Every structure is written in C-alpha cells, then in structure tokens.
Amino acid sequence: MINILTTATQAMQWPGSLIRPALSLQTALSDLVVETALLPFRTFSPATTADTDASGAGKVKRKMGAVIRRLRDMPTLASGAATRAGSGQMSPRIPSEAQYLTRRHRSAAGSRSFRLYLPASHPDRPKGLILMLHGCNQTPEDFATGTHMNALAEKHGLAIAYPAQTRRQNRVACWNWHKPRNQMRGTGEPAILAALTRKLMREFGLGRDDVFVAGLSAGGAMATILADVYPDVFAAAGVHSGLARGAAWDTLSAMSAMHSGGAPTGIAAIAATRAGPVRRIIFQGADDRTVNPLNAGFIVAAEMGGDVAPTSVGKRSVRGRDYSRSFYADPKGAVLIELWMIEGSGHAWSGGRAAGSYTDTKGPDASAQMVRFFLDKPT
C-alpha cells in the first residue's frame, strides 16, 4: 500500500490555510487506513465514538459559530472526565536515601523548573531517564503521586524528571502542544524540554537508548511531539490520552481535535536520523469524553503510515475491566507501537493512585507497562 500519510504531509506547508490542508490530509488518510489503525475500537464500539465521522472533512467545514457554541460546553484538556482525588499538591513518598530535588533549567529557548527523582539504588549513576509531562491543572508533585512512577524508578534504578509548565505560559498549566512553534524542532517548548533532557543525559552519562518520555493528555500530546522531532534524544515514548502532532494549530482547532479526533495536518516532515524510530506505547480510555479515542488511532497512523494493520491483537481483563492490546511491528518483527484500548475508562491515568488527580485506579497499570516497554529494548 502506498504510504498515503507521508505523501500528503510532504505536499503541505505549515501553517498554511486553516481549511485546505486539513481537507487534503483528511482525504488522503482514507477510511481504510483509519479503520485499520483503530481495530480495537470496533471491539468496544463505545457510544462516545459511534457518531464520529472518521474523514473529518465535514467537521472541518463547520461554521465558526457552531464550533464556538460547542466549545462552551467542553472541558479543558485534562479535566471533566475523571474524578479529581486529593489536593493535587501532595508530594509522593520516597525512600529515605532517595533524592527528590527541585531544580531549574535554563536554555536559549527558555526555562522551566522541574523535580528530579534519583533512586536510592542508583543515585549517582541511574540506569535510565524518563521525562514525565503532566496534564493540565496538574503539578509535578501531583503527577508523580498519581502515576507512582517514582516507586517504579526505584525498582529499576531510573531517574525521573518532572518539568513544570507555568500558568504564566498557559493559564491552566497545559503544555502548549497545539501552537505551531511548539510542534517543530529547535523552537518553543520542545526545544526547552529537549535541552533539559540532554543536560541530564550528560550529567548521568546516559545515551539515547536509555532515555524516554511519557505524558498525560496535553503532556501526552507533547510527548508525541518530542518523539517526532527529537528522535536522536528519546528512544521510546509513552502517550496516555494524547493527540498526534499536527492535530491542531490554535485553540479552536485543538478543542475540535479533542472532541472529534484530529488527523495530522500541514506538519513539516522530519528528516530521518541514524537514531532509528522512536518506539511508542499508547494508552487510551475507550470512554474518554475529553480526548476522543480516535486520536490514538491517528498517532498510530502518523507513525506507521500506510502499513497500519496490527501484527496481532490480544484481549484481556483486569478487575472485571476489558482491554485490548494491539501490536504494530516493522518488517523485521520488532514491535514499534503498542496500543492499549481500555473499556470503561475515561480521561485518567490507568492504574494510577487515588492520591493523585486524573487517575483511574482500576487498571491496567499504565506506569508499569510503560517502564516494561521502555526497558524491553528490541534486539
């Protein structure tokens, strides 16, 4: 099959028109491609996606007044679908000999504060590094508590960096994934986060194969962007309830993509590097009413191109909850993408801890599976 997605994206310039590029790519991304990428959705058939027009062409043509009326009733990205537990300011518990440091990173692109967890098992020479990107209305402390990622870092000897988005940059502390300058290499927030990661890599003597990024919602969308534009920095990415790079170009298109699904439009092609592909593990609640589950399929399609049929699909359950796990491999059989679709789960970190916000304690455990995926390097 011709790589339809790649051909279409290379023919367009960013940012371009607000309508024509979207129509061009939506047309190129055929119904067959989208449906193949979203096989698990057919299994669950959640009511929230039953009336979704996969092509998106009709949605792009909506009158602005209708879009604005709909947006008034929509939550922000990382709110509404999940019950918020706790104050969101509780610091995670750590072993007595571990370190949970407060630092500030400064670079030519900008600065951000961050929390850095160094495990007691390997404080000076961690075995790897995960950059964790919180969702809107969250803090690094809240995100660390809810994902329980520090406990996993201690178990595996990993360092964890939790950058903080500021309300000065976004009024609800969202990473600005939808702005064009934040979807390209060398500018904006991706440049800040990549520079922070590189600095920690030098400090701990880590190579690209031991460095990963993960995020929730707006943080998940930014994790996708970093995987796309900095494949020389990150070996793998964990995306929970996120969107594809190029799914939006301003606030209105971001809200539309969240609600109805957003295919990548008008994004500049990224030059190939010797680093190889960035593997991805994607978690998505099938009943998410904040970020349409179709977005998980668009992330898969953007990475795999026309070869989007899963190598295999498995169905399991945990605590009475069904979920599917789809594998997408390269021609040599190495798994590039795992897509987890979780029935009955909304906009919340799967398997998280109730003390944090936007968590679903029922599972499956997204944090444990992400770490497993990161460390299970292809041969």
Image (cartoon, rainbow, N blue to C red):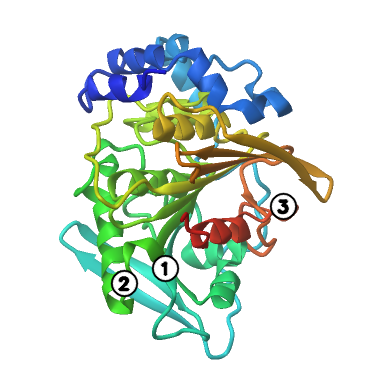
Instruction: List x then y, in percent, for residue 36.
Output: 55, 23
- Asked if marks 3 and 1 touch (Cβ < 8 Å), the reply is no
Q: Nearer the viewer, mark 3 or mark 1?
A: 1
Residue density around tag 3, few if under 14, some if 14–19, many if 20 or more, within 10 Å: many
Q: CA distance from mark 3 to mark 1?
A: 24 Å
Q: Amino acid at mark 3?
A: Gly
Relative to 85, is 261 above or below? above
Q: Amino acid at mark 1?
A: Leu
149 to the left or right of 220: right
Instruction: List x then y, in percent, for residue 117.
Output: 46, 76
Q: CA distance from mark 3 to mark 2?
A: 31 Å
Residue density around tag 1, few if under 14, some if 14–19, many if 20 or more, within 10 Å: many
Instruction: List x then y, in percent, for residue 86.
Output: 66, 62
Viewer-side residue, 159 vs 326: 326
From the image, tell me which residue sits under label 3.
363
> Residue 116 has which mark?
none
Residue density around tag 2, few if under 14, some if 14–19, many if 20 or more, within 10 Å: some
Where residue 21 sits, quadrant-wise, is top left
Q: Mark 3 vs mark 2: which is more N-terminal? A: 2
> Residue 129 has which mark?
1
Describe the element under mark 1 as helix, strand or loop. strand
The quadrant the N terminus occupies is: top left
- Asked if marks 1 and 2 touch (Cβ < 8 Å), the reply is yes
| Residue under the image location 21 percent in, 59 percent down | 110
50 to the left or right of 4: right
Quick one: which residue is furthest to the front in this view? 332
Instruction: List x then y, in percent, for residue 87.
Output: 61, 63
From the image, tell me which residue sits under label 2.
200
Q: Mark 3 vs mark 1: which is more N-terminal? A: 1
Is residue 288 visible in the rendered structure shown here? no
